[in-house]
Amino acid sequence: SVLVKEIYRNTEKYIDENVVVSGWVRTIRSSKSFGFIELNDGSFFKNIQIVFEDNLDNFKEISKLPISTAIKVEGLLVATPNNKQPFEIKAKSITIEAESDKDYPLQKKRHTFEYLRTIAHLRPRSNTFSAVFRVRSLVAYAIHKFFQERGFVYVHTPIITGSDCEGAGEMFRVTTLDFDNLPLDENGKVDFKKDFFGKETNLTVSGQLNVEAYALAFRNVYTFGPTFRAENSNTARHAAEFWMIEPEIAFADLKDDMELAEEMLKYIINFVLENAPEEMEFFNKFIDKGLLERLNNIVNSDFERITYTEAIDILKKSNKNFQYPVEWGNDLQTEHERYITEEVFNKPVFVTDYPKDIKAFYMRLNDDEKTVAAMDLLVPGVGEIIGGSQREERHDILVNRMKEMGLKQEDYWWYLELRRYGGVKHAGYGLGFERAIMYLTGMTNIRDVIPYPRTPRTAEF
Ligand code: 4AD
Ligand code: MG
């Protein structure tokens, strides 16, 4: 038997030959003497058309097959240059491998994405989600390829950790406590600090601190794994569990960091355009009409670079009625980010040098002592997809920043030690993997680019 993808990619080889394919019935229509099946074999985004006639001894049975039945087809592959599909299989025999129940929820009509989320176990069988999750897989591959080709070492940072990288307290606690037999402290209160075999731990919000240590050993490194945020935000861009790519480069500053981010993003875009043309066509046609034009423009132009202070000026001069006030010192909200990247520049924009008070403790303090060497990359349609910075390599300044932010030095002892043993300047960033997929596909809800979304109200599957 042969995979449908192989037939599409090497059609010449199979035309006028007998082929055997197996897959699931996507659609079926039939008349008294013949019928058509759109078959999807899972190997490829596209279906293959099967024509069957009443010369099959099980013609009646086949005509009535419910959608999603698995079948095996043997027949002649014929070219159909005048049809919508370039070829079809004229069936000589069709065997039923696994018949579907008739109440299969994905009937031919279009379903809303909201509905499809309630059947997350079946939605990869729909066109949109077939395309999304194939692209997601390819992008993961492209990311590894990009970094590995440049000699970056892939570091597996821990999921369970004792430190809070972002210092924002948005962590899920990990516990081994026996809730029927909770440990009590001397005041008779439950001692939750004992929760991970006697230590307080949580699910990681970022692998950065751990990966910094490896950058100071291997120079160029990256981590790519799941991260968790216990933020109770119900937006289309936040999930409680998401994947993040975090490169970290030593002997490098913020400028090098931005150059790496820009090169990486362009590489990924080129990779999916080249390796998933059918899926990208589909998104361009049915999900986001300007997608291909936009992505092609992006790979051929430079990203914009502005400072936070310039961004505030632009926003103030915009005469827009923003919901959140624009004031130097306030964080940029999604509405601000989208205005800048969509209405002012209409391309990806790096915003740099944010006020230190709205950024994490590890970012390098600028000479003005008011801002830090941070960068966020904002893109049209999504907003922030990357957050990064040059790291504070100066031990004493770092200690001061931690004090200012109320972080305990003993919790970060090993991180501080890195500054004492050859702690050269270094920088890195985090790319939100789901946000990158949204950007590449035009999908507008993060729940629709991760197979099983974890958000405050969805954790069923
Ligand atoms: O800006 P963030 O919080 O940066 C960090 O975690 C740094 N430690 C990264 C680094 O420098 N190594 O997160 C980075 C990116 C964001 O730009 C966003 O794309 C994504 O992670 N992100 C989320 N994606 C989905 N759901 C959430 N709740 C997210 N929070 C952050
Ligand atoms: Mg951020």
Image (cartoon, grey):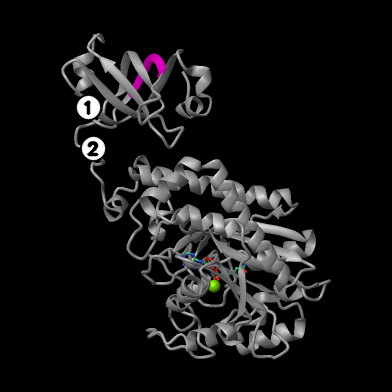
Decide whether residue 194 is among the magenta residues.
no
Foreground of the two, 269 or 457: 269
Question: Quick one: SS at disc 1?
Answer: strand
Circle number at residue 104: 2
Q: Residue at x 29, y 26 (%)?
A: 37
The image position of residue 12, as x and y in percent, is 52, 20
Decide whether residue 72 is among the magenta residues.
yes
Q: Is residue 361 above or below residue 152?
A: below
Question: Quick one: SS at disc 2?
Answer: loop
Q: Amino acid at mark 1?
A: Arg
The image position of residue 258, as x and y in percent, is 67, 68
In the image, which residues are magenta? 71-78
Quarter location, residue 165: bottom right
Q: Quadrant of ligand 1?
A: bottom right
User: Which class describes the residues within 10 Å of circle 2: few (<14), some (14-19), or many (20+)?
Assistant: few
Query: Would you name the residue on which mark 1 appears?
Result: 29
**In the image, farthest residue toward the front:** 82
Q: Amino acid at mark 2?
A: Tyr
